[in-house]
Amino acid sequence: MKKLILLSSLLTLCLFSWSAPHGKFGKTLKWRYDTESQTLYVTGTGELPYPIWAKKIYNDYYSSKESPYTFGDAQLIKGKAQWKVKNVVLSEGITSIADKVFKNCTFDEFIMPVSLEKIDGTSSITIGKLHYNGSLEQWLNLQVADKCLHGAYRVSKVFVAGKDLDGSIVIPQSVTHLPAYAFYHREITELVLPNTIKSVDKNAFLKSYILKIDFLGTADEWCITDFSPASKYLKGELLFRGKQLPASLRLSDKVQKIPAYAFYRQTQLTDVVLPSGIISIGEKAFRGCKGINTITLPAKLQTIGDSAFYATQLTEIDLPQSLQYIGVAAFAYTNISRVTWRIPDYSGNIKIFDRGDINHFTFTSSVRTIPSGLCQIMTRLWYLTIEEGVRTISSDAFNSSAIVKLELPKSVSYIGYGAFSECTNLRLVSIPNPACSIQDNSFSNCNLLTQKPYPGGTVDDKRHKEKLPEIWVKDIDGDAVEISSKFQDGHITMLMFDATWCMPSRRLTKYVEENIEQWKQQYPDLQVIMIYSHDSSPEKVSTIGEVYFDSSDSKTNVMKKLVGSNTYPIIVFIDKYGKSVAGMKSASYWQHIEECIQKAADSK
């Protein structure tokens, strides 16, 4: 009886096993489906070929005999029966996966064997957890096609030798190359990189988040190898052998290129000394290094990448003759107010600076051509120096800039179309070369000039040399007062046109209030006279100087009469002889007030 029961059980098990979905892939691989775990197991040796699931599964891949099973959207189908495939297990012995295997499938888990050497490609696959049974070094040595199982498509979690690739990763010393998509879309808390690595694929860390990098080498080695594919995604600290990058960075002559993202967002950097042999600085190499306020660019430097010094604290920059290209926004969001340009004939990108910050620009004798549009719309560019040797000023070079005085060297022989058009502060133009070719509209809408500039001559705005006309305003009691005599008594004057209802005016006035005593200590003859709009509130006016109110009549309005504007705030700087020597529109120019005071003090 016991033998009969045992025989019956074995027969039932055999029938169940025989009826479970199963088949072959080619001559060396077999597959079976476990209905309980909804797992597809593939065993054998060699390549997992394509098409595994295309239209029909063949018992023998190389014969014409069809399997009764079909596969679509990760489901086994036999007649009306369907089995959902949630997991895939590839056994040891499988050495490669052909292209497009498991295309358009979604799996909860996918297990890859250590014997796997090559993945030709699998597209549009989604995996919840990918397990690779080999070591991290073996994982990095897999030969993989672009965007395949190595991580370049939708894989939520990757486990190598049981360790989650999200978290802390230590690359073995034996690794010399980091391949494409090795750490695709990972969240890495700490990445330890040995100095044995000689190359990193540009997509090795694509879309990853790296909180910390510890490089087991020197800053020189970091630059020479180019770890930009990793540093591009660094959100926190860059360490060298466990120690924070020092505030002072000194690179040796071994370094010829600063890679992209080399020191991206390393805010502890305050002092950087570049070796003389540097020929390129990569994209965003020092972006966000807010401690850097000065740097000397090497004489052999040829290229500066996009945003290379973006959001640093640089205050001035000297661009060497050797430069051939400067990237977009290379010096944007800095504090640069002075630029020295030595590049002879530049034809690259001109969107280099924050145009509203620069007030001093010097073109040295090495320059032959000032590029088209380079200083266009520089609304604070008051001081322009063009040295002897410069020959050509290209079209729109200084269009709409704030230049007050233009004294060209005799070497300038060509001024392009619109080169100085819309320079509404321009009051003096000297063009000593009688053979200079001046194109149409080179000085169009320079409204303060009394006549059109001409070769070999000087055009001056006579009005700025004359003493101010009578100025009738109202005092705090509403009585009419003529105040022009107040500007002719040996004082230098800040004449401020203000309005209590204007927010920019209030900000500018507050800044003046905070600094006026300091300025008066340096310039004892400084006085402040404030003329408020007729509709300003008397109880809200400032007391930093004498207070008056303007007329509401447009014909007698002092602000309109003196500066031709009705936009607040405006400051006019008047020398001790009663002559207007500088003007300032907009509260955003507040950091240049002291320069204007100095100009008024030096006026003769």
Image: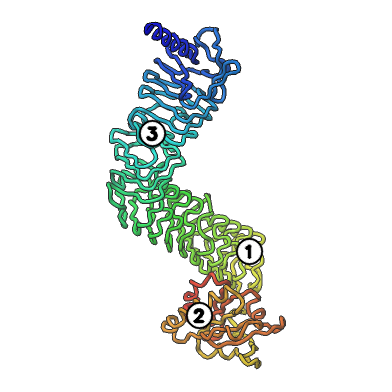
Checking the image for residue 388, the label placed there is none
- Answer with the quarter of the image where residue 116 lies: top left
Residue located 57% across and 22% down the image? 72
Q: Are marks 1 and 3 in contact (CB under 8 Å)?
A: no
In primary-sequence order, the first of circles 2 and 3 is 3
Residue at position x 48%, y 13% from top? 23
Quarter of the picture holding the N terminus: top left
Name which of mark 2 and mark 1 comes first in the sequence: 1
Q: Check disc 2 and report the residue beneath it.
A: 600
Which is more foreground, mark 2 or mark 3?
Answer: 3
Question: In front here: 425 or 69?
Answer: 69
Q: Position of residue 423 (x, y in %)?
A: 61, 67
Q: Residue at x 58, y 76 (%)?
A: 570
Colour mapping: rainbow
At label 2, the amino acid type is: Ala
Res 151 quadrant in image:
top left
Instruction: Write down the residue under mark 3.
Output: 159
Q: Residue 357's x, y, as percent?
A: 51, 64
Q: Residues within 10 Å of mark 2 (few under 14, many from 20)?
A: many
Q: In the rendered structure, which amino acid carries the disc numbered 3?
A: Phe
Give SS at disc 1. loop
Specify few, some or many for label 3: CA neighbours under 10 Å numbering under 14, 14-19, or 20 or more. Answer: some
The reply, left or right, for residue 264 in relation to residue 80 is left
Using the numbered discs, state the Cα–Cα distance from disc 2 to disc 3 in whole angstroms: 71 Å
User: Which is more N-terminal, label 3 or label 1?
Assistant: 3
Q: Is residue 565 visible?
A: no
Report crowding for label 1: few under 14, some 14 to 19, many 20 or more residues within 10 A (C-alpha).
many
Q: Which residue is mark 1?
A: 421
Report if the CB atoms under discs 2 and 1 are less than 8 Å apart: no
- Marks 1 and 3, how far apart in space? 64 Å
250 left or right, relative to 165: left
- Up the image or down, 160 lies above or below 250; here it is above
